[in-house]
Image: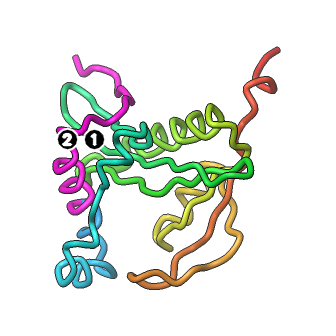
């Protein structure tokens, strides 16, 4: 029987494996493929982020399924700076579980708002996760969506 998905902090020794996971997930999209092939250095997961506890890995049965990067922005805000899932496991709840962990991390760090710069293809996903589009931003890969969600207050979950 398959085990449940576990979300855990990333370890330094898996940095390159996470970068390769990001590459596989990113190359699926036609809009980014050639830019990533031309500029492989665009995929970089700094060791400092792993050391700082900003990188969270989803794992099941010993296999890495995806990861998220959550950064503090100050003034009660945080940023979901990266969310990548193995393409052969899309639509199995991994990304949603990582967003939930990002929300918890943001809350634990004192943030009330979580921001993300999202690819247009991810608009519906982020909306289903409670984000709203608040703008657009040019990136090296084209126009992206600026999105924001309120971080749930754990006090409001209590009965």
Discs 2, 1 touching: Cβ within 8 Å: no
Task: Locate residue 103 relative to residue 91 in the image: left or right.
Answer: right
Element type at marker 1? strand
Describe the element under mark 2 as helix, strand or loop: helix
Residue at 49% in and 64% down: 122
Residue at mark 2 to residue at mark 1: CA–CA distance: 13 Å
Badge number at residue 14? 2
Residue 78 is inside the magenta segment: no
Q: Is residue 146 left or right of residue 157?
A: left
Residue 150: give x, y in percent of width and height: 73, 47
Q: Nearer the viewer, residue 105 or 87?
A: 105
Task: Return the disc, 2 or 1, that comes first in the chain's sequence.
Answer: 2
> Colour scheme used in the picture?
rainbow
**Residue at (17%, 51%) from the top-left corner?**
16
Pinpoint residue 55: horizontal percent, then vertical percent. Answer: 39, 42
Q: Is residue 104 left or right of residue 135?
A: left
Q: Quadrant of the C terminus?
A: top right
**Residue 7 on the magenta span:** yes
Res 65 label: 1
Question: Observer-nearest residue: 154 or 53?
Answer: 53
Q: Position of residue 65 (x, y in %)?
A: 27, 41
Q: Which residues are magenta?
A: 1-24
From the viewer's side, name the closer residue of 139 and 72.
72
């Amino acid at each position: 029987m398959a085990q449940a998905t576990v979300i855990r902090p990333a370890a330094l020794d898996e940095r390159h494996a996470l970068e390769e996971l990001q590459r596989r997930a990113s190359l699926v999209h036609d809009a980014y493929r050639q830019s990533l092939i031309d500029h492989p250095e665009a995929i970089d997961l700094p060791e400092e982020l792993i050391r700082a506890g900003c990188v969270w890995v989803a794992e099941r049965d010993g296999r890495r399924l995806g990861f998220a990067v959550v950064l503090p922005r100050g003034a009660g805000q945080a940023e979901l700076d990266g969310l990548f899932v193995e393409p052969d496991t899309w639509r199995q709840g991994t990304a949603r579980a990582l967003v939930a962990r990002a929300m918890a991390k943001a809350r634990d760090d004192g943030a009330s708002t979580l921001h993300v710069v999202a690819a247009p293809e991810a608009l519906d996903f982020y909306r289903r996760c409670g984000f709203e589009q608040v703008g657009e931003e040019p990136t090296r890969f084209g126009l992206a969506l600026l999105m924001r969600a309120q971080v749930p207050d754990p006090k409001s979950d209590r009965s």
